[in-house]
Image (spheres, rainbow, N blue to C red):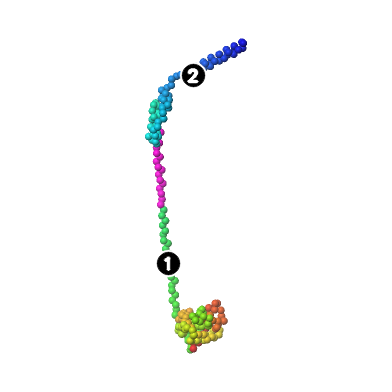
Amino acid sequence: MLELLRRVAVLIILSAVGIGLLAPVATRSATPISAVTAQLLRAVERPTSSAPRTLFAGRERSARLTLAEVAQPVAAEALAVASALPTPASLSFSAQFAPIPTPRSTPAPKQRTRSVAPPPMIGDTISGKATYYCCSRGYRGQAVVALPGALGGHYDAPPAARYVTICADRCARLPVVDYCACYWGTANQKVADLSLEAWAAISDGDRRVMGVVRVTIHLG
């Protein structure tokens, strides 16, 4: 029983000490709130404004409604429209094609063909160079000859009316069926053009290698 009383006495003492410590705090909490605090509390309890919050007017109006009674109102936030960034300067390019002058080719000077005297006639015989040609109309595959106009060459339709004897490695009697210019009267003049068969008739040389053969023509 004595021990119980001691415990009760200790609890009463501790409670008294705790109440004594809390008394200053309760006294401070009972101090009236300041006027500024009361204004802020009243402003918070007011209904929210339904004014539109546009970029400038709405935001400023809302700030004035909520902070109207604050001793030192906070200035409304001002948002400035950002100015447009300057457009960088543009450069325009245009392609220009300069004509390239075509070099003028200088024509080669014309070589004057030196005239020479025709090969000499000895009686009815004449000697000189002869070449070959393909053929004459109506005489393909035959041994025939074409002569310069000065020696009586002209086209003669079949059958041939005139013959001459032409000699190289051997002689052959050939019909005159056509005309050739034969560079007559120049340094490159010829006395006859032979068909392929006529070349083979008077010469053993390869016409594709030689190209030119020395001949004697008996016109009579």
Residue 25 is labelled as 2
How many labels were placed on the picture? Answer: 2
Q: Are marks 2 and 1 in contact (CB under 8 Å)?
A: no
Q: Which residue is mark 1?
A: 104
Q: Secondary structure at mark 1?
A: loop
Residue 145 sits above or below residue 69 on the image: below
Left or right position of 86 against 208: left
User: Is 143 one of the magenta-colored residues?
Assistant: no
Q: Secondary structure at mark 2?
A: helix
Give the magenta range: 76-92
Give the mark nearer the N terminus: 2 vs 1: 2
The residue that appears at 43% across and 68% down in the rendered structure is 105
Place of residue 91 in the rendered image (x, y in percent of width and height, measured from the top left): 41, 50
The residue that appears at 46% across and 85% down in the rendered structure is 152
Magenta: predominant secondary structure element?
Answer: loop
The residue that appears at 38% across and 30% down in the rendered structure is 64
